[in-house]
Image (spheres, rainbow, N blue to C red):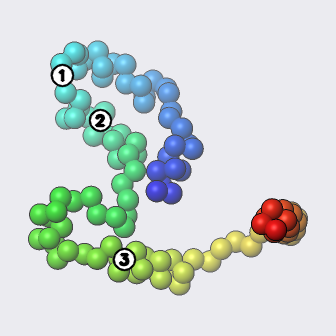
Amino acid sequence: MCGEVDGVLKGLAADSGTMAAEVIRSVGAGGTYLAHPHTLRNFRSEHYLPSVFNRDTRGVWVSRGQADLRKKANAVARELLASHKPTPLDADVDSALEVAFRTITKRAIGNAA
């Protein structure tokens, strides 16, 4: 889901390469773009392909051993936790987040009473 949201937030590029006016003219009405070199060059970057979730058909999924999504996600999460070395926030950003958190917490507690 995060990957899909990231794609939406990035927006769509609208330039001569992505709009492919020449491709549209050459393929024409009723033609197919799926085998066109432009489509082959660009389709993977325009669609979100999840690395954990399986989009295979049920038959393919079963034939490959019915990978358990929870186990796969858990393994990916453990690998990320073991290997990720985050860059610390700047002190001013950290301080601003702390102030915002306290403000929101006070407001939430006040609204809950």
- On the question of residue 81 being in view, the answer is yes
Amino acid type, label 1: Gly
Callout 2: helix, strand or loop?
Answer: helix
Alpha-carbon span between mark 1 and mark 3? 42 Å
Disc nearer the start of the sequence (1/3): 1
Residue 12 drawn above or below residue 87: above
Along the horizontal axis of the image, is 65 left or right of 101?
left
- Quadrant location of the C terminus? bottom right
How crowded pointer 3 is (Cα within 10 Å; few <14, some 14-19, many 20+) is rated as few
Along the horizontal axis of the image, is 12 left or right of 61?
right
Q: In percent of the image, x 54 and y 81: which residue is there?
A: 81
- Can you tell which quarter of the image residue 10 is in? top right
Callout 3: helix, strand or loop?
Answer: helix
The residue labelled by disc 2 is 39
Q: In percent of the image, x 47 and y 82: which residue is there?
A: 78
Q: Nearer the viewer, residue 4 or 43?
A: 4
Disc nearer the start of the sequence (3/2): 2
Alpha-carbon span between mark 1 and mark 2? 13 Å
Alpha-carbon span between mark 3 and mark 2? 34 Å
- Residue 55 % position (x, y): 27, 58
The residue labelled by disc 3 is 70
Residue 18 drawn above or below residue 84: above
- On the question of residue 94 being in view, the answer is no
The residue labelled by disc 1 is 31
